[in-house]
Each structure stands twice: as C-alpha cells, then as structure tokens.
Image (spheres, coloured by chain):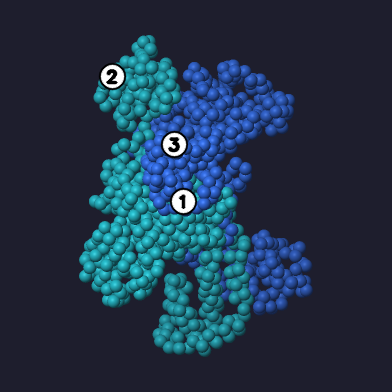
Chain colours: A blue, B cyan
C-alpha cells in the first residue's frame, strides 16, 4: 500500500508547523491584548446544530460522520429495510387476480400512452425487449419503464405467456423498492449519521453562547482558533481541512467594537511585517439604501458586481452591464456619485450621505460608517489603509451592519486575507433572541502564502536544536549527557546523536538539519574536563569548560 | 431546539483553554528543548491507512466519515441494491415448478427437522402461524424460520392452498434480500465511507514517515500534539475527542533514547509542579523471558495481571489465581524471586538476571533495562522516581523493547498519566521495513485532572484583561482609547467597556471577570489630562498621567 492522505488535506512539516504557529501565536497574542478570551468547541457537532445554517450548498459540503457500531445492521433492524420487505410481501401476497385487475384498470385509464408503441407489440420485438428490460435499462426513466411494462403486459396477456406474467411481478417489486429507497434517502441519511464535522466557527460559537449563557458575562469577547472542514472541491489555496482564526463580541451594539476590530487587523498585520494592507469597510444599511435607490433589493448583487469592475473596464462598460441586468437608466443616474468614488474617505462619505439622504436606513449606515472611520482616523493606524468600499457585499445574507474585508499588500496576487462584519441576531437560530454580534476572521492559509511570497518568515525560530553533541561511545555520551541536562534546564535546545557513529555521518546530520553548534567529546576532552565547541557556520573550534559552554550557547 | 453537543465531547471555557494551553505549552517546550520537531497530520486519513491497525475492537471504534455528495444514491446506482434486485427478479422468474422441486428436495434432505413440529401441522394452528410469521417474528433465528417455512409449506401442499403458496415466495424473497444485505454490510460500508478520523497519532506518524521518507533526516525526532477521536463509551476521564501529546524517535535503536524519554517525563512533570511521579519501566524481552520460564506465552497476561495484585491480596492469593489460570506450581517456583521484588532497582535487576539466566531474550532484556536505569541514576532525576515493574505489559502486541508508564503522585486516584515504549517495526505496515521507533505519550486530560485536584493551576495566567476602562460616553471613550492603544502596544491586555453605561453595571462586569484594575475617565480627567486608576483588590484609587499609567500597569 502506497501511503497517501485524502485529497484536500495536508501534512505539515516541522518548518511549516513552526511558521503556522508563528502566525497563530501572533494572532492569539493580539486577540488577548484586545481583551478576547479563548474558547474551544468539539470537532463534531450534532447534525441538527449545523444543518440548514449554511444554505443548501453548505449542507452538501458538511462532512457527516457515520454512527459508530453496526449502524447498517441497526438501520435494517429498525424499520428501513423491514418496511420495504413488508411491502414486497404484500405485493407478492396479492393474488394474480388482483394484480391483473389493477393492471386492467390502469390500462383503461392510460390507454393513450401506448398509441405510439405499436412497434413494441410486434411479436419479433417481444423477446429482445424482455431481455433488456430487466438488466441493461434499469435506469430508464419511470415513465418509459411503465410504458414498456404495460406494453409487455398486453403482449403477455395476448400470448397467454405465464412465465412472462410471473416476471412482471418482479418488475413491480423492483419499482416498489426503488420508489421506497428514493423517498427514504434522507431518512436513511439521518439514521446512519447524527454527527457532522464543524463547518465554521461561528455557528458552534452561537451554540456555545446559548448553551452556556448562564456561565458567560456579557458582553462576551471570545476568540477561537481551530480547524474546520468542508467537502469543497480542492484547489490552490482551498483545502478540505483548514484553520479559522475568529474573534467576536456578542451582547453589545456599540460601534467601538468596529473601531477595535480595525485596530486589531492593523496590529496583527503590522506585527507580521505585512504593511500596506487595505482594510475595506462597508455597511449593510448603505447597501440597503442603494437598493432602495436603484429600485430593487434583488438587483443589489448585480449592481455591486458590476460597480466593482469600474477600475478595470470603465464607467461606460459598467453602466452597460447594469442596464443589461435590468437596472434602469434613471436608477443609474441617481447613484451617479458612485462612479466618481475616489476621493478621501470623508469626501466619499459626504457623497454617500447626499445620495442616500432620502433613505432612512441608508442614512443610518452612512452615520455608522462615519463614526467608525472618523474615530479610527483620530486614533491612527500603524501600517494599514482604511477604505470605504460600497461594492463590498460579502455575507450579504447575514450581516446587518459593518462589513469588513482585508486585501493583501498591493502587488501580491491573493484574494482577501481577512473578513467579518456585524450580525444582529447571531443566536436566534438557537432560541436566544436579539443578541447582536460582530466579529472578524483571519485567513491563516492565505496569510501564510503571502508571508512566504514576501519572504517574511525569515525571523521565525525553526524547531531544531541549537547544539548537537556527537556520540563516540558510551563514556563520551554519558559525559555529554551531563552537559546536555544542564543546557536543557536553561531552555537551550540540545541533542545527543543517538548512535555512536563515524564523525562524518554525525556532521552530515548536523549540516542537513542546519544545526548551528556541534560539541565534540573524545577521551581527551573527558580527561581535561572540557568540551570542544564547533561553530558550524564559521568553522571556528574552541575548547571550553561546562560553564563557558553554557554561557556561549545561552 | 435546545443546543447540546455530542456525548463524549466537550466545550472548553476560557479558563479551561488557558489551563490546557499551559500544560500543552509546557510539554511542547520540553519536547523542543530535547530536540524534537513538530509535525501535524490531517484530522482524517484514508480508511485503509487506519483500518486493521488497531485490532477488531479498534476498527469498530474508528469514526468513519460519509462520502460527500449524494452517496446513498451513488451506492444504489452502483451495484449494491441493483444486484439484490436482480436476485429478487431471478427468484420471481423461477416458475412454481422450479420452486416446488427445490423445496421437495430440501424436504427430502431435511425431513428429520420437522419431527418435533407436529403441533404446527394441526389444522387449527395454521392460520395463526401464518399471521404472525411475516409480521411479528421477523427476527426469529434463521433455523426456526426455515423450519416454520417448510412446515407451512407442507401444510399448504396438503391443503392445495394456492394463496399460501404464493405467500411463501414472499418469504423466500425476504430471506434472499436479508442474506444479501448481511453479506454485503462491509462492502456497503466501504462504498459510502472512504475516510476516517485519526484514532491515534502513531499510525498517522508511521504513514507520514514512509510518505515523506525522502524529505526526512534520520534519526527523526518528531513530536505531535493533536486531537484524536474514538467511538468509545464515554465515562469519567474518557472522551470521544481528546488530545494526544506524543514524542517519538525513528531510525535509531540506541538506548540513549530510552534514557532521554525518562528525563523528558521528569522534566515535564517537574515543570508542572507534579513531583513524586513514578516512572515505571519494563522490557518486552523480560516478559518473553518470564513466558519462557512459566512455560507458555499465552499465559503471560494472566500471569502479570495476577502478579500485579501482590500488594493488595498477598502472595498466597496471587499464587492461587495463577494456579487457577493453569500456570503450574513448578513454573511458579521458578519465578519465585518476583514475589519478593521490593528491593532497590539494582537488587531487582540482579534477581531478574539470575532468574532469566537461561533465557537468551530475557537476559538481553535485563541488560537493556540495566543500562537505562544505571545511566538515568548517574545523571539523576529532578523529582520523579524510576521503578522496575515487571507487571507492566501495556501494548504487549506491538512493543518489542522498553515499556514505560507514569503513575501520578501517590494519594491521587488516577490511572497512568503517560506511557510508551519501543516498537521495532513501526513503518512496516506501510512497506518500509526495519525502522525501529521508540516514543512516549502524555495523557493531557488526566494530567489536567491531577493538576486541578492538587491546586496546581494557581500560577496560570488567565485570559482576561489586566485593565478595564469604563465608558461614560463618546468623548470619554475616545480619550480612553488613546491610552488603550498605547497599553496594548506594550502588550498589556486592555479593554474598553463597549457601551456607555452606569458605573455600577461596568464595575459588576469588572468584578465578575476578576479584572485587577479599572480606569475611570470623566470630563474632569479629560480636562486635567489624567486617568483615575482603581485597584479592584485594594480599592485604592489614584490619579495619574498616561506615562504613569503605563508604568503602573506594565
């Protein structure tokens, strides 16, 4: 067996783990500095917790876990197969007379079905039809199947062919089972699977908040860094198992949270050395206002998708696309300011305010956005840019206020490396109404790719020992181990080559693992109570006492 | 819907996450100090990677993941149901004559079956039997079912009851389908599920080593801290999702590894404040030697289980148990030294050497054990005890050399908190022969319970802010945020209460979360450019400048 892993999953090498840990720890530290607390939830949830929360497509992409034990047997014993078997029995138990009567009445009601089936009634076709009907054409559609069935049936009555009549019972049995199974697929699914792997961190978090509401002090600021699983088609940068890094606040509608989340993005990306990211911000209420102006909520996505292309294809083409999607010329006229939306944030907000003046909700959205942007501007950002982007429509179905998205530094080809927003009724699905939430997420895998592309992992401490002690035999190893214990107690990563081996082999190992220092212990060193320390980069070699050795490596 | 999580899984609160992270980080730091490198593997593996590696019981406890998409439909279309339907057809298509001939020959061959069934042949019973046969007694065993079937069949022939004969076909169909499903359960299983959740970290590690052998420098010292899943019956301290913390070395047979693993246990448990743990050590070769002496490998477990009770029930009762298990008096005589096995490690090793002198393998085991114990003794342990324990037989099936187990400090009722051993052919299952491995594991959940019981989490830094700024309105909040940004830049966990609210509410929040400091900002503070810092423990309140505030909280 050639070992492999399921598609869309990954092994992580020591270097990759170190780099990922570096990103995760940077994010976690920032989360905690901002007052967020960690929670963890189980990898799998009860299916009913997850199903129906992500739309039909989401339901399909959730990994379901088979019930443990002899699940199929249990299923059979329960009622699934049993019921179908009873149905077969009841059909078989019906006498020929009943069967023929039923068929006759069906024929009477459906005689026109067979008008164009004369060719089937010719004697010479009967046998070949009969032979293929049961074996090769099982998957013909039901209508065709029924027509053929009754065609043959007529023929069999005509020929008084008793064997054929017997066979027809078989077909009826088959139809019956097939119908039953088709109708019961979903039921069977839920009987053999009651658990499913986490699809995101937001729904489990909502479940957590409701389940533990009596232990939680609100407003509750939580962060969560755990893997999620999606049965998506794997592709570059998209995996079936990947980490999400989320921070959310529930139980407060304060816009200060939005301000803090922007600062949090700025803090993390600055710490990672990723300057000049662009934090894009929009507000669902502004989108609603635009929808009012263009005259239809259902055209909103078409509108934002077209508007998003302004930089690439120009105003003329964008407007053509809008018109082709059924947005009227009059509506486009009303949102004219959006086509010259390249002033400062403040100028853009003024234009929006004017344009949406007649929409109560749109005006509210502009006010919210203005507060957040003004406050962030006064407080200042370390390295990120903040930019109003009215084409930002992610999570349109659940976000109700702010919408965030972070773009990687210009020049790096990568989709968004973070996103989030406010949702007014996070926990409603679990029966706890009117709890507002707002949160953001960091895209670990994409951030990894960006840092790699920009060469920003240089400073990461790789998981390798700082010093290797060569091993020339039992005495030498024991002498070395005394030093190693002391070094380790000081937190210095130290390793003894496990086998007594030739110098060359051990040096090769040190070189391959890029270990900085090697300590050589031979009989001479033991006699003189010293250690020979070799710097593998400079090649320099010195003899030193144990305390000197510790100082040198500390 | 009342939110809940699957049995055997857990939510972790912020405090629990902090405590668990503290343990995990202590273990990881020690792993790295000892030269181990982290890897991570996917949560699910291909089923064939896992199945058959843990015995039948293990296979049953592996969580299988349903194939994504319309898996049941695919199954049906493929051949599973289809084949069974073809079989039904072929049965139905058999004419009555064939059926009767088959039944007659069966009757001839099995006539004696019906000798004691006279009561079924009485006329008055026929109808009631018939009524119950198909509906209520579906789950009677097959033998009974067949007997009844033919009993009724005889009766039906006798009565020339045509309806009854028809019904018998139904029973035959049912039997046929039932047989088919029973025989194809496993096949169906593998068709609807091709992936399974990781059951431990060792098999995925073996798979990793073989798959990445060309990228790895051997000897390869890896550590891995990830969750595993088992469909075990949940009970106190046993969960369906739990973390394993493993360190292993592959590619070296050096006994220095065993020495280092004992030091590693000692280092971690000492760091956690868990002194006086007992690291028990045995060697598979010594167990083989004992098996030779008592005369049978298959009595070894009975022997060690009985011997393990020596402290509790005394020599007399232990020997009685051994005799009852078929271990001879002569054999017990030969292992007499094991009944007075309470000297020093060195004395016990001498006794073992003498007792196993005639067993080559046993002698090798004693030599290995002696090297490890002597070396560890010379180098010294910080807080753990090291103890030879010949009753230690965990992982008997795969360990080939050293066997480790760590017992919690005396007085704490808890099973082993760690274990491991050497296995000579770790990667053989994946086609890479003769790679020796040795490793240990830390039982995170049990260590957690022990630390909790002994009150050893006191020093853990809980994930809460050090300081809360109260919020009296927009101006005050903005003034506060300027300080908060500075504090966060210094790594001080700081939080603004998100909503402008009454003092009492905000103080309640600070108290509930046990936040140490609160900063109060009113119009007076803004005017005087100061902050009022309140120590929530002492109640002391001081006015200070921003730089004083930072110094105070740093």
- What residue would you read off at disc 2? B541
- What residue would you read off at disc 1? A472
Residue toward you, B253 or A4? B253
- Using the rendered image, report if marks 2 and 1 lie on a common chain: no
- What residue would you read off at disc 3? A553
Q: Secondary structure at mark 3?
A: helix
Depth check, mark 2 against mark 1: the one in front is: 1
Question: For residue A112, what is the image quadrant?
Answer: bottom right
- Using the rendered image, report if marks 2 and 3 lie on a common chain: no
Q: Position of residue A302 (x, y in %)?
A: 65, 33
- Using the rendered image, report if marks 3 and 1 lie on a common chain: yes
Spatial separation of the CA atoms under disc 2 and disc 1:
65 Å
Q: Position of residue B212 (x, y in %)?
A: 56, 51
Q: Chain of mark 2?
A: B
Spatial separation of the CA atoms under disc 2 and disc 3:
46 Å
Mark 3 and mark 1 lie on one chain; the one further toward the N terminus is 1
Depth check, mark 2 against mark 3: the one in front is: 3
Q: Residue at x 54, y 38 (%)?
A: A539
Q: Secondary structure at mark 2?
A: strand
Taking the view exactly as shown, the residue that stands out farthest to the top is: B527
Up-down: is B42 above or below A286? below
């Amino acid at each position: 067996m050639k070992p492999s892993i399921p598609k869309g999953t990954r092994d992580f090498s020591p270097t990759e783990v170190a780099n990922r840990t570096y990103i995760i720890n940077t994010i976690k530290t920032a989360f905690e500095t901002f007052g967020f607390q960690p929670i963890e939830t189980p990898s799998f949830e009860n299916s009913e917790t997850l199903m129906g929360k992500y739309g039909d497509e989401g339901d399909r992409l959730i990994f379901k876990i088979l019930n443990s034990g002899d699940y199929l047997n249990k299923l059979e014993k329960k009622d699934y197969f049993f019921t179908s078997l009873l149905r077969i029995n009841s059909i078989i138990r019906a006498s020929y007379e009943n069967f023929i009567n039923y068929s006759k009445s069906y024929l009477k009601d459906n005689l026109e079905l067979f008008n164009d089936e004369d060719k089937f009634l010719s004697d010479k076709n009967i046998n070949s039809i009969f032979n293929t009907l049961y074996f090769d054409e099982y998957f013909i559609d039901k209508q065709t199947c029924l027509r053929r069935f009754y065609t043959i049936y007529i023929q069999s009555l005509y020929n008084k062919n008793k064997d054929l009549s017997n066979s027809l019972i078989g077909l009826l049995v088959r139809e019956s089972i097939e119908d039953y199974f088709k109708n019961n697929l979903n039921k069977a699914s839920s009987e053999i699977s009651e658990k499913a792997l986490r699809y995101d961190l937001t729904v489990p978090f909502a479940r957590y908040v409701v389940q533990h509401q009596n232990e939680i002090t609100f407003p509750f600021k939580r962060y969560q860094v755990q893997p999620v699983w999606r049965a998506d088609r794997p592709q570059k940068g998209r995996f079936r198992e990947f980490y999400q890094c989320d921070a959310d606040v529930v139980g407060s509608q304060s816009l200060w949270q939005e301000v803090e989340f922007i600062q949090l993005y700025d803090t993390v990306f600055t710490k990672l050395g990723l300057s000049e990211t662009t934090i894009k911000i929009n507000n669902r209420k502004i989108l609603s206002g635009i929808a009012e102006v263009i005259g239809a909520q259902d055209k909103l996505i078409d509108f934002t998708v077209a508007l998003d292309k302004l930089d690439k294809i120009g105003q003329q083409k964008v407007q053509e696309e809008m018109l082709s999607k059924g947005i009227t010329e009059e509506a486009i006229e009303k949102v004219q300011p959006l086509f010259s939306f390249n002033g400062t944030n403040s100028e853009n907000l003024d234009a929006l305010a004017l344009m949406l003046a007649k929409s109560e909700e749109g005006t509210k959205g502009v006010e919210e956005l203005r507060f957040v942007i003004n406050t962030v501007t006064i407080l200042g950002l370390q390295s990120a840019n903040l930019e109003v982007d009215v084409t930002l429509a992610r999570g349109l179905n659940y976000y109700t206020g702010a919408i965030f998205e972070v773009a990687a530094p210009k020049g790096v080809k990568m989709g968004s490396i973070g996103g989030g927003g406010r949702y007014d009724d996070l926990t409603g699905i679990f029966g706890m109404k009117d709890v507002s939430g707002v949160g953001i997420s960091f895209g670990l895998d994409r951030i990894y790719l960006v840092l790699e592309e920009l060469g920003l992992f240089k400073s990461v401490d790789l998981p390798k020992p700082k010093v290797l002690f060569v091993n020339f035999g039992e005495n030498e190893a024991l002498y070395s181990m005394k030093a190693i214990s002391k070094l380790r107690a000081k937190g210095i990563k130290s390793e003894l080559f496990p086998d007594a081996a030739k110098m060359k082999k051990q040096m090769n190992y040190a070189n391959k693992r890029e270990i900085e220092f090697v300590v050589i212990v031979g009989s001479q060193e033991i006699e003189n109570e010293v250690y020979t320390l070799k710097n593998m980069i400079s090649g320099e070699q010195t003899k030193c006492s144990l305390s000197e050795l510790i100082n040198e490596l500390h």
